[in-house]
Amino acid sequence: MQRLVRERAQDICEYCLYPEALSYFRHHIDHIVAEKHGGTTHPDNLALACRTCNLRKGSNIATLVDPNSQRPVRLFHPRFDVWKDHFLMVEYSIQARTEIGYGTILLLELNHVDRLLERRLLIDLRSGE
């Protein structure tokens, strides 16, 4: 099952798109919906996640986008959602196209300064700068 998850994701984090080949740590197999929330260890509920995304996501399945409204918004679900429908890569940052994207960016801290620097280096290396 781990091989299926890794091959399906092409060894790239399904949340931030960071390639495992460039990561110091091996990517994790993430339960999209944690077992404590009724998620199963089935390929439809598993995603490949870099260590940073997996640790920041934890067992969360939703987040508060607007703390004043207290209305939860579900997180990006790699099996049901299409990354490009919810996110847009602008230079080195990941921008939201939807509330789901926005909430996921906030919770996983996809644009934390360390992640932006890491992404910049990766993009610069790929472009030969």
Image (cartoon, rainbow, N blue to C red):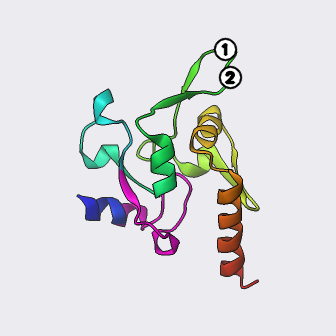
Q: Secondary structure at mark 2?
A: loop
Q: Which residue is mark 1?
A: 69
Q: Is residue 44 left or right of residue 12?
A: left
- The total of numbered circles placed on residues is 2
Badge 2: residue crowd in 10 Å (few <14, some 14–19, many ≥20): few
The answer to whether residue 76 is magenta is no
Reply above or below: 45 against 116. Answer: above
Residues at marks 2 and 1 touching, judged by CB atoms closer than 8 Å: yes
Badge 1: residue crowd in 10 Å (few <14, some 14–19, many ≥20): few
**Quadrant of the image containing the C terminus:** bottom right
Residue displayed at 64% across by 72% down: 122
Q: Quadrant of residue 70?
A: top right
Residue displayed at 32% across by 43% down: 45
The answer to whether residue 8 is magenta is yes
Q: Which disc number belongs to residue 79?
A: none
Residue 57 % position (x, y): 48, 41
Give the CA separation, mark 2 to mark 1: 6 Å
Residue 107 % position (x, y): 58, 38
Reply above or below: 42 against 113. Answer: above
Closer-to-camera residue (78/114): 114
Residue 111 % position (x, y): 68, 50
Closer-to-camera residue (100/84): 100
Q: Which residue is mark 2?
A: 66
Residue 66 % position (x, y): 68, 23
The residue type indicated by label 2 comes to Asp
Of all residues, the one furthest to the bottom in this rendering is 128
Q: Secondary structure at mark 1?
A: loop
The residue type indicated by label 1 comes to Ser
Secondary structure, magenta segment, majority class: loop
Residue displayed at 61% across by 35% down: 103
Q: Is residue 105 left or right of residue 13?
A: right
Q: Which residues are magenta?
A: 7-29
